[in-house]
Amino acid sequence: MDALLSTLLEFIPPRLLWGLFIFSIVAFVGTLLAIPAILVRLPADYFEEHHPRLWLAHHHPILRGLGLAIKNGVGLIFLLAGFAMLFLPGQGVLTMLIGISLLDFPGKQKLERKLITHPTVFKAVNALRHKFGKPPFSLSGID
């Protein structure tokens, strides 16, 4: 184990390793708090094809543009953190699902439905919603 650590330290500075370690802990705790808060607030029909996705539609265009930029930035952070959590401690797939739901891109709803219909993800998300007294997500109209 010491040989592996010394080889690793030859290529990666200790300061960077500590930064990654701290980021991993903060991201893990952050997602433990943020994921339930977000998933519980989504409407039960969020993953249905007909669910409207107009965010800040009735606000001033500058406010809407700024809000969309911030939402997409946060979504990108969640997506990247979720990807990192596939290899580090954390809820990688659920974090990626939240990140994707915050991003705006073509084919987003199809990708969201593909992720949420995975049996393990669907069961975990609906168990979480049940724990907070929310109805399960409905999936009618899924391909």
Image (cartoon, rainbow, N blue to C red):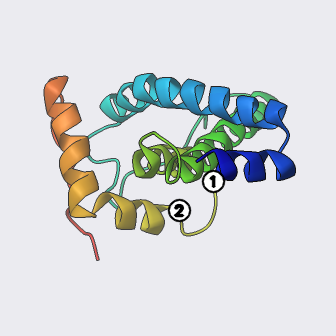
Mark 2 neighbour class, 10 Å CA radius: few under 14, some 14 to 19, many 20 or more: some
- Whether residue 103 is visible to the viewer of this picture, yes or no, is yes
136 displayed left or right of 84: left
Q: Amino acid at mark 2?
A: Lys
Identify the residue position indicated by label 1 in the image: 104
- Quadrant in the picture for residue 54: top right
Q: CA distance from mark 2 to mark 1?
A: 7 Å
Residue 4 point in image, percent of width and height: 66, 52
12 displayed left or right of 100: right
**Dot 2 lies on which element?**
helix
**Dot 1 lies on which element?**
loop
Mark 1 neighbour class, 10 Å CA radius: few under 14, some 14 to 19, many 20 or more: some
Q: Residue at x 52, y 45 (%)?
A: 88
- Whether residue 64 is visible to the viewer of this picture, yes or no, is no
Identify the residue position indicated by label 2 in the image: 108
Q: Residue at x 42, y 22 (%)?
A: 33
Residue 17 point in image, percent of width and height: 74, 36
Identify whether 22 is placed above or below 5.
above
Q: Amino acid at mark 1?
A: Asp
Residue 25 point in image, percent of width and height: 55, 27
**Quarter containing the C terminus:** bottom left
97 displayed left or right of 67: left
- Quadrant in the picture for residue 47: bottom left
Q: Which mark is residue 132?
A: none
Residue 27 point in image, percent of width and height: 56, 31
Q: Are marks 2 and 1 in contact (CB under 8 Å)?
A: yes
